[in-house]
Amino acid sequence: MDTPITGFVRAGSLEELKAKGRLVVHGPHRPILVVHDKGRVFALDNRCPHMGFPLDRGSVEDGTLTCHWHHARFDLASGCTFDLWADDVPTCPAEVRDGEVWVRPVFCHADPAAHWRQRLDDGLAHVLGLVIAKAVHGQLAAGVPPPDVVRQVALFGIQNRDGWGDGLTILTALGNLLPVLPEEETYLALFQGARRVAADCDGQAPRRQRVALASRPDLATLKRWLRRWTAVRHREAAERTLLTAVATGASPAALADLLLAADTDRAFADGGHSLDFTNKAFECLDLIGWEHANAALPTVVGQMVAARGAEESTAWRQPIDLIALCTEAAAELPDLFAARPNMHGWSDHAALARALLGDHPVAIMDALKAAIRAGAIASDLGRSLAYAAALRLARFGTANEHADWETAHHVFTYANAIHQMLKRIGTADRDGHIEAVHGVLHGAMALYLARYLNVPPARIPGEGSEPLDDLPANAEEIRVALLDVFDRQRQVDLAARLVARHLTLGHSVQSLIAILARALLREDAGFHAYQVLDAGVRQFGEWGNTDEGRHILIAVVRFLAAHSPTERAELQTADIAQRLMRGGELHQDTTA
């Protein structure tokens, strides 16, 4: 390991160095390679910054050092690499005194935070996973708060890709989880989010900023215009309208209402992704600051105006015209909310969720209307929808095709997004934001179409008389067993039973969420897995450690287990970077 030493240490005689060409200095510090070339003495970290291979086993020629493992080449004088994927090799001061060579094993930077911030920009720009990992580790070690790293990566993604993408969704989902993650998982979360943003931007055209209108129409007019431009797929007009709303100083709630109204004019657009991306853009701004709204929010407009609505799908039209049902119910919403009792605290969320899982779409719409008449506000409807969608995942039958997991996932993450947006808007006002509730109607019909995924339904562990006593009772043993489950395929049901066991025994929920995050972060996971974990933690927060809350985390772990393990190549990169940054020798036993 690397122990800081401020003074010079003797490397050897100049005569010996000239004879051998190179020396390696060992000690409590990292190994130092001392090279004599063309009458000059150079001192560098002996570990190749790419994979840690001993550089003294490389070759020196014409002022360059070549590592013989992956043939990365470095400038001896500066340590700078000619091969960007390898990163620069750190150097340290070297002096010759009275025929003796002395080196000062100090590899720090004058401003470590600034140095690693620049290196992260370099890694993102060139999609260099190892550089990204080292830069994230370096910033954290320099005391940079994790939200600042999220902001840097998010702004890179916003500026270097013409539209919101999977990478920004992953980054935001992980940013949401940072408060419950321990130090090790925080590093992995920031690395995974950053490398996915970099991959998303690779080869993409950068974003070209548009400007707001010179006039400042009222929000009602801007909403009409945004819906019109979205309907006719006029991206530039839609973006300028949205930017004008931002320029007027509209609140996040008003901007959410504006975008949600336009987004839900098409039913379940792009399989729910359009609305989910919109919600993630708002959550991203919560993380990085709303002063960036004029840069972040327009990134979702391109997909929103181009999205294909479910009204163009046969399944939504036959054998029952679900779009017509949604249209009829939407027409009743103003009167329903106008007649809603002026009350707070409607609490029949679980009962409504069970009704939403029914087999008859008319009855489902009737249940939503009845809930409004009984006092439910829009966010109550969203909460019930999200819980019902979580039950689709929790009861997903493993006899289905593996790809069918994605159908259940899309409904759940869409339902979570509509719930979060409705909460942001605030719909307790009888006269406000009726259009936003259209998304609940669409979500309910998407949930109905996914009913076959629960035929037959998987049993939820802990329900009825199913015993869990064969599983460990100690919290740490449960968590170890859970990670072991993720090392093997087809362990969906066992993973669910372990989560149920952990929760029913009253063990720490935060530690369980941390272990689920650990299980996910070590995988080369697709962005759906990150969406599910983020949405599940959000929805669990609505219920706490109740039966409903347990069902939600069981849904999450079943989905994650169904998609594990993967090759874990990115975890290997993160581990190598961490060991290099901590001064470890990765290849002490490697022979020439």
Image (cartoon, grey):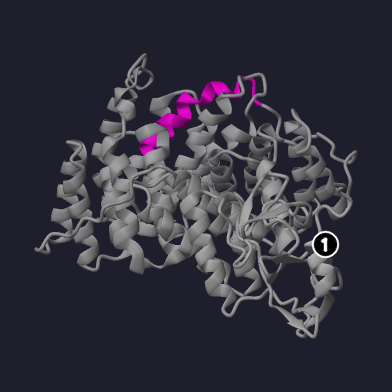
| Residue at the left extreme of this rendering | 215
Residue 288 to residue 13: above or below: above
Q: How many marks?
A: 1
Q: Residue at x 37, y 33 (%)?
A: 270
- Would residue 585 appear left or right of 171 to someone viewing this image? right
Q: Quadrant of the N terminus?
A: bottom right
- Residue 573 appears in the figure: yes
The answer to which of 218 and 583 lies nearer the viewer is: 583
Tell me the residue at 26%/32% (across/down): 327
Q: Residue furthest top?
A: 319
Q: Is residue 76 left or right of residue 493?
A: left
Amino acid at circle 1: Lys
The one nearer the camera, 429 or 230, is 230
What segment is highlighted magenta in the picture?
440-457
Q: Is residue 371 left or right of residue 258?
A: right
Q: Main secondary structure of the magenta part?
A: helix
Whether residue 539 is visible: no
302 falls in the magenta region: no
Q: Which residue is mark 1?
A: 20
Q: Position of residue 475 (x, y in %)?
A: 84, 54
Q: Which residue is depicted at the point 56% across and 53% down? A: 82
Q: 197 and 382: which one is in front?
A: 197
Q: Nearer the viewer, residue 130 or 86?
A: 86
- Percent position of residue 313, x then y: 34, 21
Residue 65 at x, y = what percent? 66, 56
Q: Give residue 311's position: percent from left, percent from top.
A: 30, 26
Residue at (38% x, 43% y) in the render: 204
Crowding at mark 1 (Cα within 10 Å: few <14, some 14-19, many 20+)? few
